[in-house]
Image: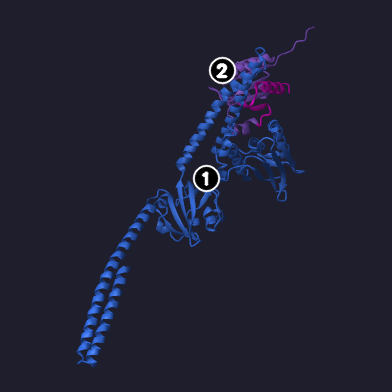
Chain colours: A purple, B blue
Amino acid sequence: MPTTITKKLLLIVEDEVSLRNALCIKFNREGFSVIDAKDGEAGLEIALAKTPDIILLDMVMPKLDGMAMLKKLRATNDWGKNVPVILLTNLGADDEHRNKTILNDENVEYLVKSDWAIGDLVEKVREVVNK
Amino acid sequence: MPHNKVRNDKERLYKKELEDHQVAILDVLENNTTDAEDIRLSRRAILNVLEDLEVNNAILEQKTIELEQSEQNILHTKAISDAILESIGDGLVVVDKEGRITYVNQAFERMVGWKAEEVLGKSIIEVIPRESEKGEIVEFNERILTKVLSGEIVIADLTNPFYYIRKDGSRFPTSSIVTPIILDGEIIGVVETFRDITKEKEIDKAKTEFVSLASHQLRTPLSTINWYTEMLLAGDVGKLNSDQEKYLDEVYRGNQRMVGLVNALLSVSRMDLGTFVLEPEPTDVTALVRGVVNEQKPQIDQKKISLFPLFGTNIPLIQTDPKLFRIVIQNLLSNAIKYTPEKGTIELSLDLINKKKTLLFKITDTGYGIPQNQQDKIFTKLFRADNVREKDTEGTGLGLYMVKSIIDNSKGKVWFESTENKGTTFNVELPVNF
C-alpha cells in the first residue's frame, strides 16, 4: 500500500504581493499546502474556514492588522485559541505589543522579515508545526 | 567727575604757590623796603611764577581735554561692550569664584524668566537648576560650571543634552559654553553662554521619525530582494552557471549590507526617540561574548589578526539586556577588527571588578587609533574619524553612538584610551545586579 504523506496546511497572510508570492512559491516547493490572504479580514475568514496547521501573519496590513486578527482568532474557538502563529513584521520596534501580548502566548513567535533568510524561515515553520 | 577733581586740585596747588610767593615778596618789602633791587627781583619772580602758571595752566588744560576725551572713549567702549553683551542672542551669565551671579544679559532674562535684579548676588545653582533629559537634577559638584571654577578641564559631552529650568518651572534643552575668567593667572569667575536648542531638538526628532519610517519602508523591498535572490541561489528555478552564481552572490551580500545599515539606523532612531526598551534578564555574558567572537572569527582570520581573549572564572549570570549587550560587544569587536591592520593583535577580557559589583569588558587593538583632536567627538552620531574614512568606506558612524547610548541607558560607563597609529583600548563597565 502506498504511504500517504499529509502535507501541512500553511496560511500566509501578507499584504505585500512580492513577499506573499515569494513565500507561496517557497513553501509550496518545500512540500507545504499553501493558502494565502491579502489582509487580516480575509485571513481570519480563510483561517476559520480551512483551519490551517500554522499561520504566517504579517503585522502591518490594511483592514485588519496582524495583531487585531490574532486577537480575534484567539477569541473564536479551541482551534483558534491554540493554532501556532508566526508573526512577521518589518517594524521590529513594537516592543509594547511584543511584551504584553506575544510573550504571554506560547503559540506565537515573532520574527523580523528582513533578518530572516527564506530558507531559515522554512526551517522555523517546520520546527513550530512539528512541535 | 574724577578729572575735574584733579583739575581743581592742581588749581588749588598753583594758587597756593602764588600765595607763597606773594607772602615772600611782602616779607621782603616789610623787612627791606628801601632795597629797590630786591623789589625788582621780587617783581620778576612774581612775573616768572605767573608765566609758569600760565604755561602749566595751558598744559593742564590740554591734559584735562585729553583726560575728558579718554573718559569719553572709555565710556563709549563700555557702552558698546554693554550693548554687545546685551544684544547677544545667547543667554549670558557671569559668576564670581563662589558661583554667585555678577552679570546677566537680556537674553538670559528672556530665556529663564528671571530679571537681573532678582538674581544678582545669588548662587547660579539655585537660580537655574540643570537637569538631564530624564529629569534628574545635575548635582552641584557635577555642574560644568563648578568643575571649571575648580580649574578642571571639561570636555563637552555632545551626546547628552541637558535642560535648564525656568523661573516658572518649565524647562528647555540647552547647549552651553562655560569659560573661566582668569586674572593674573587665577580663576576669578566663570562666564557661561547658553542657547535654547528646542528647535534643533524638534528637527532632530522629526529627522529621527523620518529615518524610522523610511527604515521600516525600506525593509520590505529588502526582504523581497533577499528572498528571491536566495531562491535563485538555492537553485529553486534551475541550476545557475558559475558567473550567474557569483553575480547573484554579490547582489545578496550587498543587500545584506543594506539590511544591516537599515537595522542600525532603526536602532539609533529608536534610541533617540526613547522607544528602545531595556529588557534585562539573567544573561550568561561569557557565552554571549564568546558567541560574538565566533561570529566574527572569519573576519579575524581573514586579516590574520591574533586574538587573545581572556575570561574571568565563575562569572555568574548578569542581569542585562542580552540583545543590547550583544550590540555593544559586536560593535566594539568589529571596530577593533576593521581598524587594525593585517597581522595585528586584539586582546579582549571580561571579568568582574570592584568586589564583583561591576562587570568590565575591555578590548585593546594595535590599530590605527583615534586622532587626538577628534577623540571628543568619537561617540557622536554619524561621526567618523578622518584617519579611517579612507580605509573603511562601509562604516556608518553609528556603532559607537549606539554603544554609548546603550551603556548610558544601562547605568554603565564606556571610555577609551587611544594613540594614533598605535592602537585603542575601549572599556565598558556595567553594574551587576544579581
**Circle 1 or circle 2, nearest the eye:** 1
Residue A47 in view of the camera = no
Image coordinates for residue B371, horizontal then vertical, percent: 58, 43
Q: For this view, does B171 lie left or right of residue A76?
A: left
Q: Over which residues does the magenta segment extend?
A: A103-131
Chain letter of disc 1?
A: B
Give the SS element for disc 2: helix
Give the SS element for disc 1: loop
Query: Depth check: B156 or A129 in front?
Result: B156
Q: Mark 1 points at which residue?
A: B161
Label number found at residue B85 = none
Q: Say which amino acid is labelled 2.
A: Val
Image coordinates for residue A86, horizontal then vertical, percent: 65, 24
The quadrant where residue A5 appears: top right
- Which quadrant, please, contains the N terminus of chain A? top right
How many other residues sit within 10 Å of disc 1, few (<14), some (14-19) or many (≥20)?
some
Q: Mark 2 points at which residue?
A: A17
Vertical position of residue B310 compared to residue B4: above or below: above
Q: For this view, does B362 lie left or right of residue B114?
A: right
Does the magenta segment cover residue B405? no
* Residue at (22% x, 90% y) in the render: B29
